[in-house]
Amino acid sequence: MQAYELCALWSGNHTEDEVEKLSGEIAVLLESFNVSLKHTQKLTRRKLAYPIMGNTHGSYRVWLFECDGEYVKDIDKKLRLNSDVVRHLIITLDPGVIEKRIERAKEEKYAHLRRDTESTDESDSENDREKTSEAPKKPIEEPKQEQAQTKQKPSIEKLDEKLDEILESDKI
């Protein structure tokens, strides 16, 4: 059995409940092909890099599974025919990668809890000391009153006069 990763994208117009239902349908599809489903990861709704079929946002789901290679083409075909799936991608993984990805997903899921419990008063005071010990190399100079007054913006009337002058001349 070969290890695979499936990533599917749904339109951002779907609610979270609808996406959950649609991802459940994909899980049922995978199980119908005797797939050994190892892990499902819900990714957040994200802005797309470019519009896809008029969608600027989308919801992602990732499945890690093992199956025989002969079923992958059939799974791909079923996903292409599914009108709710905007895009999908199935990639082959090296052996043992699934376990590493599952561990990393669990670590990322609980990383915010570890950060909260690991921060102590001692580490915070060290960070504060580091911040205060760094002094800027050049003192910051405030703009002088004279410089600010000489760089006043021209009035709209003066801009109109200048524009008319340029348009009437043959310098263009």
Image: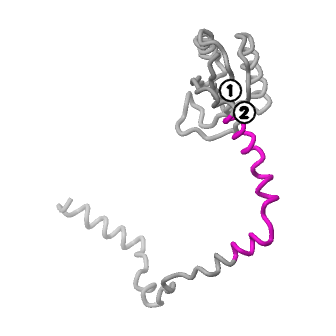
Q: Is mark 1 in CB contact (under 8 Å) with mark 2? A: yes
How far across and down, in percent of the image, does residue 41 sit?
Answer: 72, 33
Q: Is residue 138 above or below residue 80?
A: below
Magenta-drawn segment:
100-128
Q: Quadrant of residue 150?
A: bottom left
Taking the magenta stretch, the answer to whether it contains residue 125 is: yes
Which residue occupies 63% across, 37% down? Answer: 57
Q: Amino acid at mark 1?
A: Leu
Horizontal arrangement in the rendering, residue 16 relative to residue 140 (left or right): right
Residue 154, position as x, y percentages in the image: 40, 75
* 84, 61: nearer the viewer: 61
The residue at 58%/12% (across/down) is 73
Marks 1 and 2 sit apart, C-alpha to C-alpha, by 8 Å
Tell me if residue 24 is in the magenta stretch: no
Label 1: element kind: strand
Residue extending farthest left: 170
Name the residue type under label 2. Gln
Which residue is under mark 1?
A: 64
Residue carrying label 2: 41
